[in-house]
Image: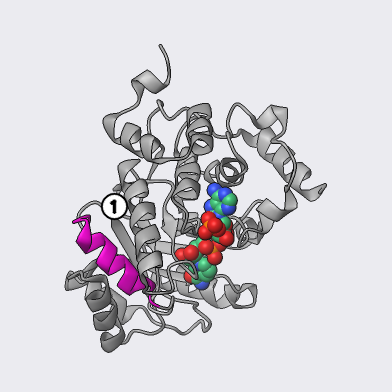
Amino acid sequence: MNRIARITRREFSALAAAPLLSQVALAQTGAAQPLITRAIPSTGERLPVVGLGTASVFNSDDEATRHAAAQVVQTLVDAGGRLIDTASTYGNAESVLGKVIAGAALQRKVFMATKLEAPDAAELQRSLTRLKMAKVDLLQLHNVRDARQSLAQFKAWKAQGLCRYIGITSTYHGDFAALEAVLAREKPDFVQIDYSLDGRVAEERILPLAADVKAGVLTALPFGRARLFRAVHGRMIPDWAQDFAGSWAQFFLKYLLADERVTAVIPGTLDPAHMMDNLGAMHGRLPDAAQRQRMIAFISSL
Ligand SMILES: NC(=O)c1ccc[n+]([C@@H]2O[C@H](COP(=O)([O-])OP(=O)(O)OC[C@H]3O[C@@H](n4cnc5c(N)ncnc54)[C@H](OP(=O)(O)O)[C@@H]3O)[C@@H](O)[C@H]2O)c1
């Protein structure tokens, strides 16, 4: 049977909104196949593996940004995605998300993750107000830099129902020792670190410990802030990757998702066509171990 004929109504409406290139990319990777989800280790709740990052791109609370953000968030939700990652320090991203999500009544459809700089009640209240939410799904301590940082207040907020999960983040490798110490001692539900095909420090430093303490892993900077797209500019996806990747974005995201310890990737975009393209990584086959090695060799050779 034709693949397109087997997609769900939700997937069809998202496809209809996407430009032709993205439709082709999605169809090539098997949108007809079931959505890939991963269990959050602490509860077993399943999350669709492709989410949305909002650093830099959602910064400005202006009409053009809100319009594009609304399309990106609707594309995510229509295709079955849920996870949106933001932070109190991403300019006006929380305010933009609050307006877009409340405006489309999507509060119950998204899994909202935000970050605070400190366990500060005023900062949490500001985030909830801006997001127009009484609670968030995931509350993360942003950029952990000291091994002594405590999650006691975050755990108290979780017990009070202000968040469902707690987490910690860092993309500064100089702070990874502190991140590891807090991860081992506090055992949060999630850890978020930078991880990309050409930036694989997390494989040695964080992923093994996250598995030990049963923390879910969110991967920030999955494209190295678009560095990977620049590296392959003008090149075709290799033949041996075409049965699992319909685009470069899917090639890069599926490398990460092939590691079972990764709960979800959170590529940043303000472009609905790019969102659709990225969501294609939730479908079809993931590369096997040999293909992952080949992907590393390929990117290293550029
Ligand atoms: N310490 C922390 O906790 C921390 C630190 C950094 C980042 N983060 C999180 O990680 C998220 C991701 O990081 P990031 O957004 O900085 O970098 P990224 O996801 O690695 O790359 C984003 C860039 O890729 C482009 N892009 C996205 N999808 C594309 C596609 N399908 N085709 C071509 N280009 C595409 C985007 O441009 P377009 O807008 O044109 O699509 C943007 O320039 C952040 O948004 C944030 O939520 C967390």
Total marks in image: 1
Q: Residues within 10 Å of mark 1 (few under 14, many from 20)?
A: few
Look at the image and tell me in which quarter the N terminus lies: top left
Q: Is residue 145 above or below residue 298?
A: below
Q: From this viewpoint, is residue 134 visible?
A: yes
Q: Residue at x 74, y 52 (%)?
A: 231
Which residue lies under the disc numbered 1? Answer: 43
Which residue is located at x 54 percent, y 78 percent? 178
Q: Residue furthest front?
A: 63
Work out whether residue 164 can be spotted: no
| Quarter of the figure with residue 78 | top left
Question: Residue 130: image x %, image y %?
Answer: 27, 76
Residue 187 occupies which quadrant of the picture? bottom left
Which residue is at the front of the view, 151 or 27? 27
Where disc 1 sits, the SS reads loop
| Residue 3 picture quarter | top left
Q: Is residue 126 magenta?
A: no
> What residue is at 46 percent from the left and 59 percent from the top?
270
Relative image position of residue 246 (x, y in whole percent): 57, 33
Q: In the image, 171: left or right of 276?
A: right
- Please provide percent x and percent y for residue 100: 28, 62
Pick whichever, 114 or 236, lies toward us.
236
Q: Amino acid at mark 1?
A: Thr
Write the start and end of the magenta stretch as one range.
92-106
* Residue 209 placement, left or right of 168: right
